[in-house]
Image (cartoon, grey):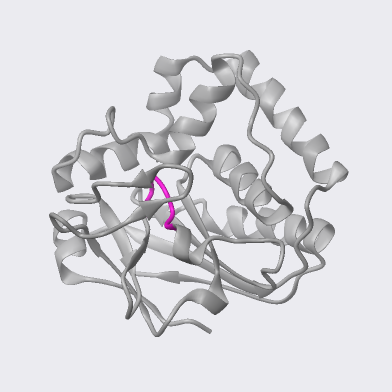
Amino acid sequence: MIEVSISNELKAVNPTMVLGVMECKALNSNYNEGLWSEIDALTAEIRRTLTPDTIKEQPQIAATRRMYADCGKDPSRYRPSAEALMRRLVKGNNLYQINTMVDLVNLVSMRFGYSIGGFDADKIVGNVVAGIGREGEPYNGIGRGPLNIACLPVLRDSVSGFGTPTSDEERTAMSLETSHLLMVINAYDGGAILPELFEYSERLLTTYADASEIEHWIVR
């Protein structure tokens, strides 16, 4: 298992935060019809029940927005990914279809309201530590280019930062060749629903990505 920890600087901002972690071997694919049936069903539910304002009131999203503000980042300018995904749907736009592992992580994120990092674990070097981004720290967000991660919660390995709740980094992005998945769930609300999330994610991974050797744990 990849060792994941939370730095003292991040814990000082939110002493009750936890990280949920899942790691497994899996088989990626370009598209999975069954997975997209579940995405379409959740899309319809989100559009039927939520608005841009009520999305922000979802407990997990509200906790992430507070975490951003407490770290010194404007959550309306640098939106957490779970919020951004839901806002896209309620505005009438469809979810981007990337590949099965990315699509699956997006589904879990929208289902539970947590911003979740999904990474090719074989591209991670050494241990992972959650900290706070520094001014001028280089970071190329997937599909975004250079991203100012100063004052954002950030995951780092021995090379550089590779994950924030706003956008993951290109270096550890999941591709069709990815066979070793690491998911990190940013639970700034204390993570009471993480057991349910783990069970849901394990079902998706085994059903749609032929996952094996699945491990999950909580980092405090």
Tell which residue pokes out farthest to the front in this image.
145
Front in this rendered view, residue 180 or 169: 169
Reply above or below: 94 against 212: above
Residue appearing at x 48%, y 38% in the figure: 82
Magenta stretch, overall SS: loop
Front in this rendered view, residue 30 or 27: 30
Q: How many marks?
A: 0
Residue 157, quarter of the rendered image? bottom left
In the image, taking residue 19 as reference, residue 172 lies left or right, namely right
Residue appearing at x 42%, y 57% in the figure: 169
Residue 196 horizontal/vertical position (percent) = 61, 53
Residue 161, quarter of the rendered image? bottom left
- Magenta segment: 164-169
Indicate whether residue 166 is drawn in magenta: yes
In the image, taking residue 15 as reference, residue 115 lies left or right, namely right
Residue 46, quarter of the rendered image? top right
Residue 205 horizontal/vertical position (percent) = 74, 61
Front in this rendered view, residue 36 or 30: 30
Residue appearing at x 68%, y 26% in the figure: 43
Q: Work out which quarter of the rendered image holds the C terminus and state it.
A: bottom left
Residue 50 horizontal/vertical position (percent) = 54, 17
In the image, taking residue 27 as reference, residue 214 lies left or right, namely left
Residue appearing at x 14%, y 65% in the figure: 9
Residue 102 horizontal/vertical position (percent) = 63, 51
Indicate whether residue 73 is drawn in magenta: no
